[in-house]
Structure formats: C-alpha cells, structure tokens
C-alpha cells in the first residue's frame, strides 16, 4: 500500500475530469519538517498545461482531494507546493497489510532479475587485512545485500592479488631471514606471519638505499639498485617464466595467507561467491594487450614497455607492460574484467569497491576496455570510497604501522565486554551469552560506525567513540531492538489486525510514516551504492520509536484495542530494525 501511488491515481482522475489532461508525472515528496503535512505535491509543471497560477491550481487540487480521497484529511498551500495531511485510517490500514510480512521491504530476486557482480576485499597476499580493508569489505558486503534486497541478483566476488613484486618482497625476506619456519612453528596467523617479512623487507630496503646515497648514488638510482630490491625483481621474472622452485614456494606462502584471510572473513561475518586470482588473469591480460598492439590501440616505447596514450581524452599515458615483459596492475585488471564477462555474459554490471586513490586507475581501465571494443565496459562501476584514519594518523602498511583487522575485531569485542559489564546489563547471562553479546555489540559498533558515513567521505575512526549506547551508533540501535523484544515478550504478543477506526497520536503517525519509507530507503541506497542511506534511515526510525517509548504507555493501557495497536506497532518496528541492520551485516541481540 503506497500513498504516492494512490494520490497519483486520484490526481490523474482530477486532471482528466476537470481539464481533459493526461498527466502522469506528478512529483510527490515528503513534506519538510518545517511545514504541516505528510506528503507534498509539486504543481509547477501543471502551470503551463492548465494556464492558471500555482495558488489557483493548488487550491483546486487540495479541495478535490479533501472531498474525494479516502485518506487526505486536510491540505495547506505554500507557493507551488500542496502539503497534504494523511489521516489515521491510511496508516492503520498500512500496518495491517504489513504486520504479517516478516521481511517487509525486502525483495526476493528471481532468475529473470539482473545480475551484478560486486567486487570487494581483493587483498594482496603479502600482508594481513587491516582497517582500510575493513571499510572496503563492509561496504562491498553491505552493498551486495542491499542490491539483493532491491530485487537484483548478486555475485559477491574478489580478485586476489597473489603475484607481483610485493609478493616477491615477502618471499625474499623470508628466504633470507625466515630460517625455513612456518606459521605452525611460530603460532602466528598465516597472513600476519607473511606480513612481518614484508615489513622486514622494507626496513632492509631503506637501509640499503641510505647506504647507496652515502656512497654518492642519487635517490632514484639507489632505489633501483638496492641489492634486496634486485633480488625481488629477479624472483618475479623467474616466477613469470614458470620456475618450479619459485612457484612451489609462492604457493606455500600464499596458502598460509589464505588460511589467515578466511579466519578474518569468518570473524567479520562476510563471504564470497566467486574468486579470481591475478596469477591466472594476468596472462589473459597479456593476450588482450597483444591484440591491442595488433590493432594499434597500444604502442611500444624504445625500452620495450607497452603503453596507451589517452591524452586526447583528458587522461595521460598509461603503462600496460614493463620493459622486461612483466605485468602491472592494469594487465591483470584487463584480464579479470574480460574473464568475468566470459563467465557471466548476461551480467548487468560489475561494481568495483576500491578506495578513491584508485579513481584515475579505474577511469583508465574502463576507457581501455571501451577502446578495445567491449560494449560491456559501459556496465562497469567504481564504488569509490574515502580512506580511514585513526586519531593517531594515517596507516602505512610498509612500515608496519597499520591496525590489523584481527587486532581491531579483538579490541572492539573487548571494549564492548568492558562496557556492558560496567553498565551492569549482563549479571544474569552465562559466560557464553556474555561472549556472544560482546561480539555482537563490538562488531555492530564497528560496522555501523563505518557504514553510516557516505562512502565518498573520509573517516576518522575512534573505536571508543563507536561503542556508545547513546547517539547514532550501532549499540544504541541494538539496544532499542532488544528493548522491543522484551516489550512484546512480556505480553505473549501475537500479531493481529488493528481496528481501522482507531485514532493514533502524532508520534505513532511519525513512526508509521517512517515504516512506509523503508522500501524506498533500500532502493535509494541501492541506486546510490551507499549503505549510509539505510544506516541513517534506521537511526531516524529508532530515534522516533525511543521518543515514543519514553512518552507513551504501551503495556499499561486499559483500552485493549489501543494496547494491541501499540504492541503491533512496536513489533513491526523491531522487525524493520532487524532487516535494515541485516543489510549492513549487523546482528541484533534479543536481550541486553
């Protein structure tokens, strides 16, 4: 039941009968908070058609709807806008329609619905996942769920950057200083184990550069001629030539990392439907580049490197293959994009969840694919997001100053545990219940804090600020959900139809008005690739309900019809909170 659809039909009837005009595109908005009303009609487009002033047209429409619409109670006119007050009957009827629908607002995609691939995480196998990855993962996973809830099929995918110079750096450092140990020997998580050698490589590399500069080398020359760097480069060439010993070692170290990644994904509550590996797709990328050379789309420089010139399109020259024939990121991205299209030829699009420092890279990637004649390149989207900073400053992975995702998850759970103990909310809980609640609240705080921010904006993440039972936070929303469960469970509540003649107060009406907006919030979030729209919708709903709860008696009411309505309303708010938080990948506890 949609008030916009109802009003559009009634307005169409009015325009047909009064002016013989068939006009279907009446714009209907939510009334701004400063004005009386629930929905607003924008009537400026009718001025040219009817040739009357906005006030005349508005008055005619307002009078017609008050006299003829079942649901319009009154109207007021502000210039070219007609603000309509919708009566209680509409909202009661709406609640009766949705009360039995457990997943109200959530679409169920069918085989005929469009398919989207959403890429996220896509880590390098030379270091653990860190806070920057966490924003990427949470964004990609949430957008996947939101797209699906809006009626689209989704394949959650990632490209694992399992080859390249960065991997070779970790391998060289391990060969020189690892003493043939493994994560099993040290007790380290696999990705953390390999990441330590990446940091060690960088430390030694900088020391060698410093010594070469002291010996009279320029900085650029020193960077290119550091012995440990040359070893890493030679290892990459051996890998690309298929050296069996190098491939075996590479496979072994990557397997350690994959085990580590899987644990982090499980702890974060995310998963994937398909995996692509740079070690496989870069060869396809090389083949595409060879064809591009044959068709004069690319060119070779004197040193043998392969480039494309996009300067006539406001971009620049971009390298596609190094002079020694080894590939770059663009090589594998071309191969991955093509392979995904071959695997899913009917897909409607691919959404790349990648930080905004790669904005230029994706502009170039999409233009190259377009120049190569791939029509599906117009269906590729870059979900660009801002970086995550800590109060202490920006993270730097090569220097080992990042916050590992595992450390962050542990800290969030610990902070949640301390807070709920301090507030005295878990005296009757078992140890297992306390641990589960700490996990739900800690991860909920982390996810909500990150996802409530527009993806384009940079985030200053403060773990302590995110865990608060007041304000626009995950724990505040989770606590409201638990409060509602306690409320409805006290009365052995069962869903029932509400008398449509019941009069509701302004706070109840505001809550119902917000519930009607849930499907549109999902659609807007999917269209804009922004989980923040769902997150902040949920906060507004929770704020409205808490205000209502503080001022209105729900259980201690003599009138059973009113009591039944208020319990049904509370129950439905709880379900929408649960659904919307699920779209953000957040669990809600039944008791706190």
Image (tube, helix red, strand yellow):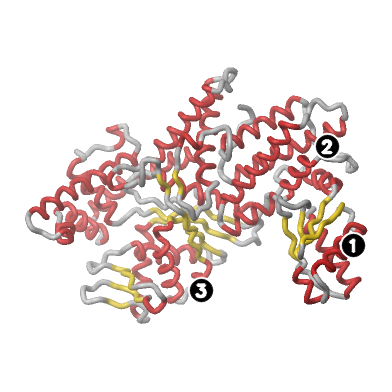
Residue at disc 1, secondary structure: helix
Residue displayed at 48% across by 40% down: 268
Residue at mark 2: 496
Label 1 and label 2: CA atoms lie apart by: 34 Å
Residue shown at 74% from the left, 49% from the top: 516
Snapshot quadrant of residue 284? bottom left
In the picture of the structure, the residue carrying the numbered disc 1 is: 64
Left or right of 429: which side holds 386? left
Label 2: few (<14), some (14–19) or many (≥20) C-alpha neighbours in 10 Å:
few
Of the 4 image quadrants, the one containing the C terminus is top right
In the image, which disc is placed on residue 209? none
In the foreground, 152 or 138: 138
In the image shown, does 580 or 341 lie closer to the viewer? 580
Whole-percent x, y for residue 320 in the image: 32, 69
Q: Earlier in the sequence, mark 1 or mark 3?
A: 1
The answer to whether residue 457 is above or below residue 258 is below
- Left/right placement of residue 557 relative to residue 390 reads right
Residue behind mark 3: 375
For this view, does 52 lie left or right of residue 114? right
Q: Earlier in the sequence, mark 1 or mark 2?
A: 1
């Amino acid at each position: 039941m949609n008030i916009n659809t109802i009003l559009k039909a009634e307005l169409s009837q009015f325009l047909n009968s009064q002016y013989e005009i068939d006009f279907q595109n009446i714009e209907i908005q939510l009334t701004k908070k400063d004005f009386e009303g629930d929905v607003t009609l924008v009537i400026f487009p009718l001025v040219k058609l009817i040739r009357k002033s906005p006030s005349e047209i508005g008055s005619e429409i307002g009078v017609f709807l008050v006299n003829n619409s079942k649901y319009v109670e009154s109207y007021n006119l502000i210039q070219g806008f007609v603000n309509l007050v919708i009566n209680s009957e509409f909202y009661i009827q709406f609640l009766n329609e949705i009360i039995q629908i457990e997943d109200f607002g959530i679409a169920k995609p069918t085989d005929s619905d469009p398919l989207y691939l959403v890429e996220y995480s896509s880590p390098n196998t030379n270091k653990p996942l860190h806070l920057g990855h966490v924003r990427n993962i949470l964004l990609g996973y949430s957008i996947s769920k939101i797209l699906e809830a809006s009626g689209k099929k989704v394949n959650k995918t990632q490209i694992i950057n399992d080859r390249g110079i960065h991997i070779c750096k970790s391998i060289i450092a391990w060969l020189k200083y690892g003493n043939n140990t493994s994560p099993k020997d040290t007790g380290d998580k696999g990705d953390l184990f390999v990441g330590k050698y990446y940091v060690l490589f960088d430390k030694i590399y900088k020391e060698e550069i410093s010594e070469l500069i002291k010996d009279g080398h320029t900085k650029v020359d020193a960077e290119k001629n550091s012995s440990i760097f040359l070893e890493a480069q030679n290892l990459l060439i051996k890998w690309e030539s298929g050296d069996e010993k190098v491939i075996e070692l590479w496979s072994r170290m990557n397997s350690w990392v994959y085990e580590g990644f899987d644990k982090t994904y499980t702890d974060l509550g995310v998963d994937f439907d398909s995996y692509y590996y740079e070690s496989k797709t870069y060869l396809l990328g090389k083949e595409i580049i060879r064809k591009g050379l044959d068709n004069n789309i690319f060119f070779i420089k004197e040193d043998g490197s392969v480039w494309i010139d996009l300067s006539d399109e406001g971009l620049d020259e971009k390298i596609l293959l190094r002079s020694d024939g080894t590939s770059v990121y663009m090589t594998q991205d071309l191969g991955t994009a093509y392979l995904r299209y071959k695997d899913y030829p009917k897909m409607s699009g691919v959404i790349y969840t990648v930080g905004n420092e790669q904005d230029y890279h994706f502009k170039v990637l999409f233009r190259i694919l377009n120049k190569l004649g791939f029509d599906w390149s117009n269906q590729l989207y870059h979900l660009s997001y801002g970086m995550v900073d800590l109060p202490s400053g920006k993270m730097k992975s090569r220097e080992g100053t990042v916050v590992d995702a595992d450390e962050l998850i542990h800290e969030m759970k610990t902070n949640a545990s301390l807070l709920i103990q301090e507030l005295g909310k878990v005296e009757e809980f078992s140890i297992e219940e306390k641990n589960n609640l700490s996990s739900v609240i800690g991860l909920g705080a982390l996810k909500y804090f990150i996802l409530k921010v527009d993806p384009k904006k940079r985030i200053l993440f403060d773990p302590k600020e995110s865990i608060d039972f007041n304000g626009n936070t995950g724990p505040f929303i989770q606590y409201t959900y638990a409060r509602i469960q306690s409320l409805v469970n006290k009365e052995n509540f069962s869903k029932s139809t509400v008398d449509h003649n019941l009069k509701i107060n302004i706070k109840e009406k505001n809550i119902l008005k917000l519930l009607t907006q849930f499907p549109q919030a999902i659609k807007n979030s999917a269209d804009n690739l922004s989980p923040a729209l769902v997150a902040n919708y949920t906060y507004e709903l929770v704020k409205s309900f808490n205000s209502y709860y503080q001022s209105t008696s729900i259980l201690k009411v003599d009138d059973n019809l009113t009591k039944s309505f208020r319990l049904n309303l509370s129950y439905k708010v709880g379900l929408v909170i649960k659904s919307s938080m699920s779209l953000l990948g957040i669990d809600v506890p039944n008791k706190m």
